[in-house]
Image (spheres, rainbow, N blue to C red):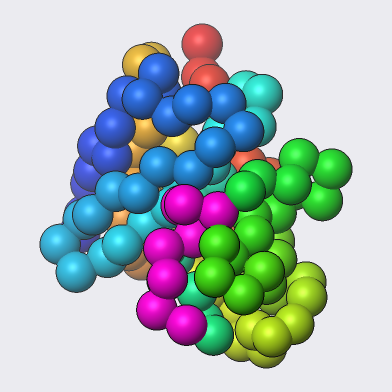
């Protein structure tokens, strides 16, 4: 991947909820908290369950696995509670106008800050 890939429209992501998007082999859970958007791997590292279906914890900036309750940081992918012990991937994204875009694979690193709408 050498250029930005469109994942969805920003308005497709309900506030404080997850949205699953597929890009080739990648399953990504997008989460919107206020004006910030986060992108993490959609598969719980403890069980093959969609994290996009979990509850968003706004205070901890995390999402809960709907099967066993593991909480994952939206900024680092690290598990914040058991039974998960392995992190999930975090993807680098940006909001360009009305669209949420995935940055090229070479630039994918855990972001220090979430994507914010660019003017």
**82, above or below 14, in the image:** below
Q: Position of residue 46 (x, y in %)?
A: 54, 85
Please give the count of numbered marks on the rendered protein. 0
Q: Is residue 36 at least partly visible in the picture?
A: no
Determine the residue located farthest toward the right in the rendered image: 59
Quarter of the image with the N terminus is: bottom left
Main SS, magenta region, reads: loop
Q: Quadrant of residue 97?
A: top left
| Left/right of residue 23 with respect to residue 37 in the rendered view | left
Identified at 45% across, 36% down, the residue is 94
Identified at 65% across, 45% down, the residue is 56
Determine the residue located farthest toward the front in the rendered image: 67
Determine the residue located farthest toward the top in the rendered image: 119
Q: In front here: 31 or 102? A: 31
**108, above or below 61, in the image:** below
Q: Is residue 63 at least partly visible in the picture?
A: yes
| Left/right of residue 66 with respect to residue 22 in the rendered view | right
| Left/right of residue 116 with respect to residue 40 in the rendered view | right
**77, above or below 3, in the image:** below
Q: Position of residue 114 (x, y in %)?
A: 62, 42
Identified at 54% across, 70% down, the residue is 67
Q: Position of residue 14 (x, y in %)?
A: 49, 26
**83, above or below 26, in the image:** below
Determine the residue located farthest toward the left in the rendered image: 24
Q: Position of residue 117 (x, y in %)?
A: 53, 21
Identify the magenta region.
47-54
């Amino acid at each position: 991947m050498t250029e930005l890939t469109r994942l969805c429209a920003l308005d497709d992501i309900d506030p404080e909820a997850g949205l699953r998007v597929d890009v080739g082999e990648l399953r990504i859970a997008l989460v919107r908290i206020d004006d910030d958007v986060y992108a993490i791997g959609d598969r719980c590292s403890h069980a093959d369950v969609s994290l996009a279906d979990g509850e968003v914890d706004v205070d901890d900036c995390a999402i809960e696995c709907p099967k066993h309750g593991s909480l994952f940081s939206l900024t680092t992918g690290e598990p914040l509670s058991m039974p998960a012990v392995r992190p999930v991937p975090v993807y680098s994204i940006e909001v360009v106008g009305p669209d949420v875009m995935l940055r090229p694979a070479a630039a994918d690193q855990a972001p220090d800050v979430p994507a914010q709408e660019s003017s």
